[in-house]
Amino acid sequence: MIQFKQYIAQEISNATEIDKQEIEGYIEIPKDDKNGDYAFPCFRLAKTMKKAPQAIAEEIKEKILIDDKIIEKIEVLGGYINFYINKTLLAKEVLEELEKEEYGKTELGKGKTVLIDYSSPNIAKPFHIGHLRTTLIGNSLYRVYKYLGYNTIGINHLGDYGTQFGKMIEAYKMWGNEYDLTEDPINKMVDMYVRINELCKTDEKILENCRENFRLLEAGDKYCADLWNKFKDFSMIEFEKIYDVLNVKFDSYKGESFYADKTDEVIQKLEEKGVLTDSKGAKIVDLTDVGIKTPCLIQKANGSSIYATRDLAAIMYRAKTYDFDKCLYVVAYEQNLHFNQIFAVAKYLVDEKYVKGLEHVSYGMVALPTGKMSTRLGNVVKIEDLINGTIEKAEEIITEKNPELENKEEVAKKVGIGAIVYNTLSTASIKDQIFDWNTALNFQGETGPYIQYTYVRTQSILEKVEKLPKFEEIKIEKLQDNYSINILKLIYNFEDILVQVTTKEEPSILARYLIDLSKAFSNFYNENKIIGEEKELQDARIYLTDCVGKVLKQGAYLLGMEMPNKM
Ligand code: ARG
């Protein structure tokens, strides 16, 4: 497809002798298309060129040679040069491209490897709403990176290691027969853990047993290892239920325990570099030189490794195993310090190119309106209940709107999940958010169901015609009204949007895009008759409707939603 932005950048670069790439970075898309489809702000050049932006803009404009088949018009306004692209060319390029499968798919990332560490819940602990957010952010990033041609590896860095398992083993020894773990295992394990912790506070001997259990577990004792595996298996059954409904997959489930025997190498290497210091028997790395006040704890006084040590071992392992270009950690902002610390320590362990590729994709808290939607134990919401509750609610709404609908259950599932996915991904990751299913399920608001509903509309229009027109058969001139052009421009930007998702690690950009495209289609649909127009006009509009449907469906998939055909 023609690259308008690059074409413009090249022309400006020729006129100014400034690097094309740099120019491309400055080019903006005006909010109001009265100011063109692309704009180049000349303010940045004012200093070096020692002229007013307006004068610079005039000067550049004079020097630019444009092909009016590509750029229709150039105008100077204030310190901007505004470019108006040729809309016929735009339409032709976009519509032709849509004939192919998988619109927007590229090989941009070919030869590059991206690791995404996401979801990563803790064994024997609840999968909480924060885990839902990392799961969905990570899943969308995973899908988008893959679509752009990157070698993408999804990693579930399970929290399956730590001294707490010594306690769990002791609890099971004492009260195992009271708990049937085949049902609701996580809540029961949490219960056991709370109970044993209470006991440990007053009973030194029990605490000693717990420590001994953990030591045995580390030494590979069969009884302890079997129990630990049991806790892990029961937890995984619960987690997999969630991954299943959300259709989330991982390439690796190597969690913390996998790195337990690889932490010695970390310690050894840090020692070699002379950066490991003693602090009351514990081993730490001081990070004040990089402005981090809290040192990174590497080994506790009792000799055991910690979360950070295992993460450092994982960085070494991942560098060696995958030779990654990027390694993303989709983890809540509460762990900002942890990641600042381990990224700072990583420079002593792996090549600089790997350190550069480490990135914490930090996300904010999710709150739930309190009340009946949650089954609570302690303060924990069961995610399964939240998901199922939303699906049930979706079914009620669908039944009310469309009592005749077939496979309501299936549709309700897609709509319920769509509501959750969109709601979770619609705000910038770093912001805190609230999940309220009444808002999330509103078919008219900026929601997942609204996007799905728009898609369903496109499909029901297409159903009304006997045969879909082919690209060669349609008359592009028929799609030059503002509503059509608005859609064409959005579709044209799809790939750029996906690239932005990966450069900013921000699926909300795609979520926003899908709403914009849905709204653009609604406007087009409300203002234009599609069926019943003269043949050429009808064909052109049908073809455009089909294109919108395809892009919405593909985009929704990349966000993590499925489209129903009816709802
Ligand atoms: N298990 C941790 C938690 O639930 C998240 C792990 C994130 N990944 C990592 N490599 N540290 O908070």
Image (cartoon, rainbow, N blue to C red):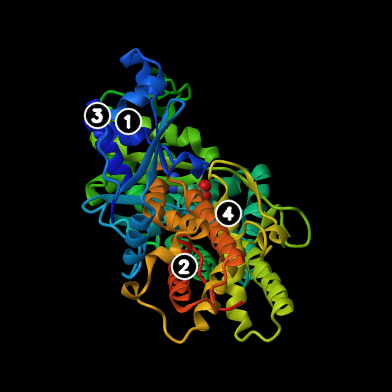
Give the mark, 2 or 4, whose residue is nearer the N terminus: 4
Mark 2, Cα crowd under 10 Å, few <14 / some 14-19 / many 20+, is many
Q: Which mark is residue 236?
A: none
Mark 2, mark 4: which one is toward the viewer?
Answer: 2
Mark 1, Cα crowd under 10 Å, few <14 / some 14-19 / many 20+, is some
Q: Which residue has dot 1 on it?
A: 61
* Picture quadrant of residue 313: top left
Q: Which residue has dot 4 on it?
A: 424
Kind of residue at disc 1 = Lys
Looking at the image, residue 122 sits to the left or right of residue 499; the answer is right
Q: Position of residue 289 (x, y in %)?
A: 38, 18
Ligand 1 under 8 Å from disc 1 Cβ: no
Q: Please say if the residues under marks 2 and 3 sit with CB atoms less than 8 Å apart.
A: no
Secondary structure found at label 1: helix
Is residue 489 visible in the rendered image? The answer is: yes
Q: Quadrant of the C terminus?
A: bottom right
Secondary structure found at label 4: helix
Q: Position of residue 403 (x, y in %)?
A: 71, 83
Mark 3, Cα crowd under 10 Å, few <14 / some 14-19 / many 20+, is some
Measured in 3D between alpha carbons, the distance from the residue under mark 2 to the one under mark 1, in whole angstroms, is 40 Å
Ligand 1 under 8 Å from disc 3 Cβ: no
Mark 2, mark 3: which one is toward the viewer?
Answer: 3
Q: Which residue has dot 2 on it?
A: 553
Q: Please say if the residues under marks 4 and 1 sit with CB atoms less than 8 Å apart.
A: no
